[in-house]
Image: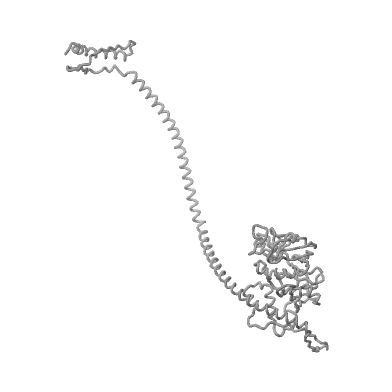
């Protein structure tokens, strides 16, 4: 061991004690500067004993400044945390108060729900039973609807069969008309001179030929098929149904009366005539049912001729008077005609077209309300376009006492429930419950629902009305439409 090593070992305990003493004086608040010593020891491997102090530090020494600063900083952080915790406690207290309030509200709501549940059991449950009954009724209605559909299918079959029968009757009527023409032209009219009690002679007219009798009662078939007894086909059936004893009698069984005016006994002519004015020129001056065949027309029709009103010669194309016929029907029915010639009927758009286009015609509309007031509307020109143009209406100038409620429909096509040709987005025929030359929708609706008593209550204006006479909410008692040539 060299000299420097021995010296280092000799002074090491004193140096350690000196360092501790200076640290002690500094920690006690002394203002003296800290004494440090630095010894340069050569880097040699120590092989001898090393002085290690085992003495305990005095408790009075305490902690140093760095530790105090750390403690202060930790204390500040804890104070900040405490403040935050206080705020959170305040918030939690408010939340707790709110929760208590919500719990009370929840108990109240629960009590209210329990009360409503009890009320539901006592009041709503019986209604559920009623709903069940309604469901059962609806099922019955569905079943009834199915039955109606079956009946409709059977009705369609009957209608086809009836059409065939009506076609046969129509052909027989044409043959009868031709035979009557030949009878008149050849002058082979038979006269039976039979003296009566007064000694006068009875002149018998030319015998009216009838179709061969059939075992099938076509009238009964028609009634079963359709209670409305549509148009011209029933008229032909009425001709063929007369008994053999009355074949030579030109007077029908019933005596119809024209609407609005009182008529004499009806007379059925032999015809056929071009129109009722032609029949008037031919000496037929009694109002009644006549056979007509318009010029260029392809079929014979029957119509009521008014021969005493305004000079006579008027062909009745429509009549409403008692509500016996339903005018809320299809396009085909309005085309071919329907109803009873001795009460309410529609002559048919096709028949009206052929009649009004063979010459210049005028239109007369007669109306009567439920108080007996009678008015009229007359147009100096009237005709229809063909079916290809949906029987578009062509009208002339108006005159009369009813007010003009038809000119608004001029140049409009005819519309029905199953063929909508109006200018409205919806179907006017559906709302007005009829067939007419609807615009958007109507100022007149003479083919609407016939209501008794005049004023009526309905969701729509669907009565038999003329807006300029009694308004759209008043259904007229009697209406008739008549045409005659401008001669």
Q: Is residue 171 above or below residue 192?
A: above
Q: Please say if 101 is above or below 74.
A: below
Q: Residue 263: which quarter of the image?
A: bottom right
Q: Viewer-proximal residue, 122 or 216?
A: 216
- Left/right placement of residue 74 relative to residue 59 reads right
For the N terminus, the image quarter is top left
- Vertical relation: 308 (above or below) 106: below
**Position above or below: 106 against 278:** above
- Quadrant (top left/top right/bottom left/bottom right) for the C terminus: bottom right
Query: Quarter of the image holding residue 432?
Result: bottom right
Q: Seen from this angle, which residue lies furthest right?
A: 199
Q: Which of the two residues, 274 or 446, is positioned nearer the viewer here?
A: 274
Can residue 88 be seen here? yes
| x and y percentages locating residue 316 in the rendered image | 75, 70
In this rendering, the count of numbered labels is 0
Can you give x and y, in whole percent of width and height, for residue 480 in the image?
74, 68
Q: In this figure, which colouring scheme has been used for the structure?
A: one colour
* Location of residue 19 in the rendering, given as x and y in whole percent from the top left corner: 27, 13
| Residue 278 position within the rendered picture, expressed as x and y whole percent measured from the top left | 79, 74
The quarter of the picture where residue 4 lies is top left
Residue 375 visible in image: no
- Picture residue at 22% right of the left edge, 16% below the top: 43
Residue at (51, 59) in percent of width and height: 128
Please name whichever residue, 313 or 265, is drawn nearer the observer in this view of the structure: 313
User: On the picture, is 143 further left or further right than 446?
Assistant: left
Q: Residue furthest front?
A: 296
Image check: 29 left or right of 440? Answer: left
């Amino acid at each position: 061991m060299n000299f420097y090593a021995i010296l280092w070992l000799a002074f090491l305990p004193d140096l350690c004690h000196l360092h501790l003493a200076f640290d002690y004086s500094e920690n006690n608040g002394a203002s003296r500067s800290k004494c440090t010593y630095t010894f340069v020891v050569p880097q040699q491997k120590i092989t001898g004993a090393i002085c290690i102090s085992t003495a305990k530090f005095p408790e009075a020494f305490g902690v140093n400044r760095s530790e105090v600063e750390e403690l202060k900083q930790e204390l500040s952080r804890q104070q900040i945390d405490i403040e935050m915790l206080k705020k959170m406690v305040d918030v939690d207290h408010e939340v707790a108060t709110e929760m208590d309030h919500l719990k009370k509200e929840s108990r109240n709501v629960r009590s209210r729900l329990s009360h409503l549940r009890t009320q539901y059991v006592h009041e709503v449950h019986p209604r559920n039973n009623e709903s069940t009954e309604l469901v059962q009724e609806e099922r019955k209605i569905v079943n009834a609807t199915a039955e109606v559909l079956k009946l409709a299918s059977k009705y369609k079959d009957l209608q086809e069969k009836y059409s065939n029968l009506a076609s046969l009757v129509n052909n027989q009527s044409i043959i009868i008309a031709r035979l009557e023409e030949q009878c008149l032209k050849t002058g082979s009219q038979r006269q039976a001179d039979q003296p009566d009690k007064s000694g006068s002679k009875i002149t018998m007219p030319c015998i009216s030929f009838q179709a061969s009798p059939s075992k099938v009662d076509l009238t009964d078939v028609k009634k079963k098929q359709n209670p409305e007894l549509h148009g011209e086909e029933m008229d032909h059936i009425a001709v063929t149904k007369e008994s053999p004893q009355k074949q030579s009698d030109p007077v029908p069984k019933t005596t119809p009366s024209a609407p609005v005016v009182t008529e004499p006994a009806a007379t059925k002519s032999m015809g056929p005539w071009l129109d009722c004015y032609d029949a008037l020129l031919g000496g037929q001056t009694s109002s009644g049912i006549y056979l007509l065949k318009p010029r260029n027309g392809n079929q014979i029709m029957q119509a009521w001729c008014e021969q005493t009103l305004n000079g006579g010669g008027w062909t009745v194309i429509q009549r409403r008077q008692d509500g016996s016929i339903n005018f809320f029907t299809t396009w085909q029915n309005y085309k071919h005609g329907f109803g009873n010639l001795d009460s309410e009927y529609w002559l048919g758009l096709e028949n009206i077209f052929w009649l009004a286009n063979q010459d210049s015609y005028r239109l007369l509309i007669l109306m009567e309300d439920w108080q007996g007031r009678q008015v009229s509307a007359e147009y100096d020109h009237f005709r229809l376009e063909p079916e290809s143009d949906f029987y578009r209406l062509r009208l002339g100038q108006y005159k009369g006492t009813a007010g003009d409620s038809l000119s608004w429909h001029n140049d409009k096509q005819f519309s029905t429930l199953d063929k909508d040709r109006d200018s409205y987005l919806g179907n006017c025929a559906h709302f007005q419950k009829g067939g007419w030359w609807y615009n958007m929708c109507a100022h007149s609706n003479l083919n609407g629902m016939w209501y008794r008593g005049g004023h009526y209550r309905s969701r729509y204006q669907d009565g038999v009305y003329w807006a300029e006479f009694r308004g759209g909410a008043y259904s007229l008692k009697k209406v008739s439409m008549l045409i005659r040539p401008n001669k």
